[in-house]
Image (cartoon, rainbow, N blue to C red):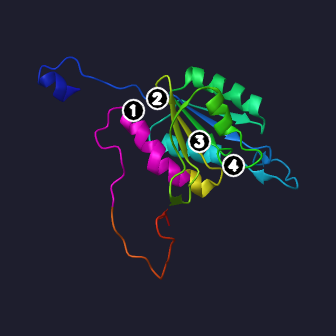
Amino acid sequence: IGLLYSLGITTVRCFKKPAIAVIVTGNELIAPGKDFQEGCIYESNSFMLKSVLNEHGFDDISIYHAADNLQYTIDIFKEASKEHDFVLFTGGISVGDYDFVGKALSNQKVKAIFYKVKQKPGKPVYFGMKSKKAIFGLPGNPASVMVCFYEYVLPALYRSMGYPMPFAKEMQLPVNGNYSKKSGMIHFL
């Protein structure tokens, strides 16, 4: 502020930090601290995403939970997208019997920009736009969520705020041991 005023600059172009909705999908998810039930897993993606978003300076974050039901997923998306600039789904974007996110987004006329990337983990990642709102469908696996967050979501958040170089710095490091991968796929270790 002092530097700007000392140069006679009284106005600057600024960008609002985006409001972010995280929609967790899956009937099998239970809240940490609840009694464990057979066939269930503890939900961690919302806590993980909220923490990493906070770490990067984003604090307008709302968490929603969607049952494995098409109409309920549509309703939660409509509610979340009213007040938020970014909507992040976790889970439900693949092709299983209970994966309704893609169908819900199609129903709501979200323009798909891409779906599925030749990478591991995180192949079934989705990105679409609706009325200047960015919509991401992240896989349900926590490791996949984090890879997709750092590779796609965080750069998009930074770009929305005018960062000229929103991507993480690249570096090459040695691998301690042998590793082989399928040709044509990017692997994140």
- Label 3 – label 2 distance at C-alpha: 17 Å
- Label 1 – label 4 distance at C-alpha: 30 Å
The residue carrying mark 3 is 137
The residue carrying mark 1 is 160
Q: Earlier in the sequence, mark 3 or mark 4?
A: 4
Which residue occupies 13% across, 24% down? Answer: 6
- Cβ–Cβ under 8 Å for marks 2 and 1: yes
The residue carrying mark 2 is 18
Amino acid at the residue labelled 1: Ser
Residue 89 seen from this side: yes
Q: Which of marks 2 and 4 is nearer the N terminus?
A: 2
* Magenta segment boundaries in residue numbering: 146-170
The residue carrying mark 4 is 95
- Assess whether residue 169 is covered by the magenta stretch: yes
Q: Residues within 10 Å of mark 3 (few under 14, many from 20)?
A: many
Q: Camera-side residue: 134 or 158?
A: 134
Locate residue 162, reporting x and y percent. Answer: 32, 32
Q: Earlier in the sequence, mark 3 or mark 2?
A: 2
